[in-house]
Image (tube, grey):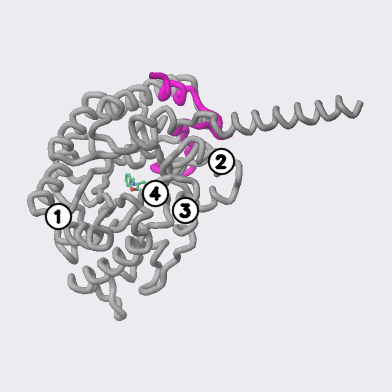
Amino acid sequence: MIRSSRLFVSAIFILSTVATFAQHTEKGLKDFYGNYFPIGVAITPRHLQDSATSAFLVRHFNSLTAENVMKMEPIHPEEGRYNWGGADAIVQFATENGLKVRGHTLCWHNQAPKWMFYDANGKLVSKDILLGRLRKHIHDVVGRYKGKIYAWDVVNEAISDQPNEFLRNSLWYQICGEDFIAAAFRYAHEADPNAVLFYNDYGTEFPGKRDKVYRLLKKLLDANVPVHAVGLQGHWSVNDPSKELLESAIEKYTSLGIKMQVTELDVSVFTNNNMPELHSFTPEQDQLQQAQYAMLFGTFRKYRDNITGITFWNVSDRFSWLDNFPVRGRKNYPLLFDEKLQPKKAYWKVIDF
Ligand code: HAH
């Protein structure tokens, strides 16, 4: 009797050890791409407080980006005051669990604090003052995570969407002209000479924007500005981009001799700005999304020598920034995991090669 219950206890022990082992070794998305490139995801520090979500992150991803907490306004809301908490938590979690971190972003026209551009009398500051503030910001943020954040989106979205305009008419541009771009890269390189420095933008596959991004990169490289790579945000849809446009963009950028990443991938199921009558993921959307994800990852694999990372913008269809953009309150289903964190059909397409 004693002997059989001991046997029973040891059997349970062995089974539970095997189960734990299986759980830890269950393959995730990143494992299928181990010989290709890291697979990342944009998160908020809150994801790390929930053990089921953090285990899910570690299973599927080997790189993290902060969706918001490293942006200029959240991290540096007043001159001389920083909110390090969220950024520190993400970097610490990544370090403890062996994930890489991409920093996002150091110089952008959105989510930049007002104080950066104005003096005490509410007047726009001079170019010298603004560049001094930018330098201080970049040195403080990049310096704090030196050696822990391997890549930075230094400048985000500086190119204009207007057909007859080259650079976006932001406060950065109004005050500094185009010089703020080269300056931002130089400051980041001073602060961490080993960090890989990116110019990051959206719509980078469409010929008008693509040619402007190419022109900017070429100009920076010709002037020996330390720009090392281009980030295609990858806010795409079930229709866009086509394989042809994606390939021609990849070839055009990499002809400059720089690396690239897809930094903010999602595939919207909508192709217009209408509010649908039905808030659900339809079988037609599912089919189109599977095909689009299969095409995208097939292309990424083909260009593995040039592509050094793919990062998803948000974790699962439970929440996406696209639930509120460009149409507020329109639920989207742009990611590889559903609202219960289960893999969608598109997931199986992405790992089927
Ligand atoms: C991105 N912009 C930003 O890089 C990222 O920081 C943010 O969290 C979400 C999306 C995409 C974008 C935009 O800001 C304006 C128009 C189109 C696309």
How far apart marks 2 and 3 lie (CA) works out to 14 Å
The amino acid at mark 2 is Ala
Q: Which of marks 2 and 1 is nearer the N terminus?
A: 2
The amino acid at mark 1 is Val
- Residue under the image location 38 percent in, 30 percent down: 33
- Please determine whether, in this image, residue 132 is positioned above or below residue 212: below
Q: Earlier in the sequence, mark 1 or mark 3?
A: 3
Q: Name the residue under label 1.
A: 225
Q: Name the residue under label 2.
A: 55
- Residue under the image location 18 percent in, 73 percent down: 128
Does the CB distance between marks 3 and 4 fall below 8 Å? yes
Q: Mark 3 points at which residue?
A: 90
Q: Earlier in the sequence, mark 3 or mark 4?
A: 3
Secondary element type, mark 2: helix
| Residue 119 visible at all | yes
Check the image and name the residue furthest to the bottom: 121
| Residue 327 visible at all | no
* Crowd around label 4: few <14 · some 14–19 · many ≥20 (10 Å): many
How far apart marks 1 and 3 lie (CA) works out to 29 Å
The verdict on residue 331 being magenta is yes
Q: Name the residue under label 4.
A: 101
The amino acid at mark 3 is Ile
The amino acid at mark 4 is Val
Secondary element type, mark 3: helix
Q: Tag on residue 151?
A: none
- Residue under the image location 19 percent in, 60 percent down: 186
The verdict on residue 3 being magenta is no
